[in-house]
Image (cartoon, helix red, strand yellow):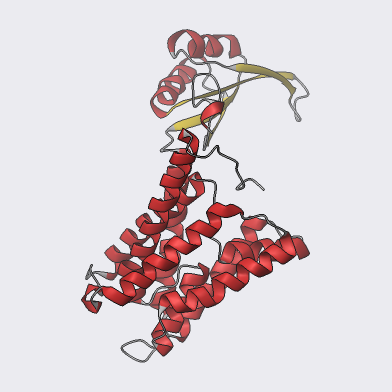
Amino acid sequence: MAFITKEKFLSNEWISAYSYLILGSIIFAVSDILFVVPYKLAPGGVYGIATVLNTLFSWKISYCTFAMEIPLVILGTIILGPRFGIKTIVSIFIILSTVWLMETYVSPDYAKVIADPMLNTIVAGVFYGISIGFIFKSRATSGGSDIIAMILAKYTKLSLGKLVMIVDGIIVLFTLVQPTETGTIGWEFAIYSLIIIYIEGKIIDMVVSGANYHKTVMIVSDQFELISSKIKDDLKRGATIFTGKGVYSGDEKKMVYSVMSRRELEILKLYIREVDPFAFVNVTEANEILGEGFKSLNED
């Protein structure tokens, strides 16, 4: 399991991991109480279910979550084995404690700190993403729906990523049973919750992998030598040349593969347009780049 780590106690890695874990857990709890619960949103997870139960029955978020989270951890451990690690348990405890403290001692006047629902949704998504990104960087999980998805993954052929989306999607649908001010079905709750999930996912990627501005480019061109020289000599980037065969023509083709910044890519595209306007150029997002010239493998 990728999230089980063995940092040496009080080492720099241990301090860094637990700093991310504690900060992320507290931000998650505060964000949930300030930006999610007041608007009756449920962007997945057990806290999403707890929000719906809080709206319908005025039950405390912390109590509802405790009643779901602890049994899930126990059940997950029985079915999957000890895969979560101590840090996941610590994260669950910190989030639960912070939520309970805010519910118990903070005045309910905190409700709807941000008056505009859409602005609130954006802020919630950003803070949710930062908090969960920090928890992931500590090599822990936030438990909850992740555990449900892991259990389902053991007995189905679906990937863990798809199962997390399905579980969170079902939780979002629970918002439809919440009463609205006009007495209609609460579609706006579900829509805002989905927006939070989308923004959260983007922010998590930025926090875990960094704000990446690099692109992967693959170029098929008869002028591959000129293009690779441009990359090496002018852009000061590395490149790899592959040999392939065109399916339709049957001719041997050369492909130049490289990774570079957006600015460097624009310079290269202008050059390719000059030397071979008929070149085939494929550009994709480079979500994470490890190795010489980029992020060291030792930092991951």
| Residue situated furthest front in the rendering | 9
Instruction: Depth check: give the residue in front, 260 or 14.
Output: 14
Q: What residue is rendered at 75% in x and 20% in y?
A: 251
The number of numbered badges drawn on the structure is 0
| Residue 197 coordinates in the image, percent (x, y) | 46, 61
Residue 164 falls left or right of residue 77: left
Instruction: Depth check: give the residue in front, 129 or 81.
Output: 81
* Residue 77 in sight here: yes
Instruction: Depth check: give the residue in front, 177 or 128.
Output: 128
Q: What residue is rendered at 54% in x and 34% in y?
A: 300
Q: What residue is rendered at 68% in x and 63% in y?
A: 77
* Residue 49 in sight here: no
Q: Please determine whether, in this image, residue 141 is positioned above or below residue 18.
A: below
Residue 78 falls left or right of residue 284: right
Residue 143 falls left or right of residue 96: right
Q: Please determine whether, in this image, residue 14 is positioned above or below residue 133.
A: above
Q: Please determine whether, in this image, residue 171 is positioned above or below residue 221.
A: below
| Residue 109 coordinates in the image, percent (x, y) | 21, 77
| Residue 93 coordinates in the image, percent (x, y) | 47, 63
| Residue 253 coordinates in the image, percent (x, y) | 70, 19
Q: What residue is rendered at 45% in x and 17% in y?
A: 271
| Residue situated furthest bottom in the rendering | 183
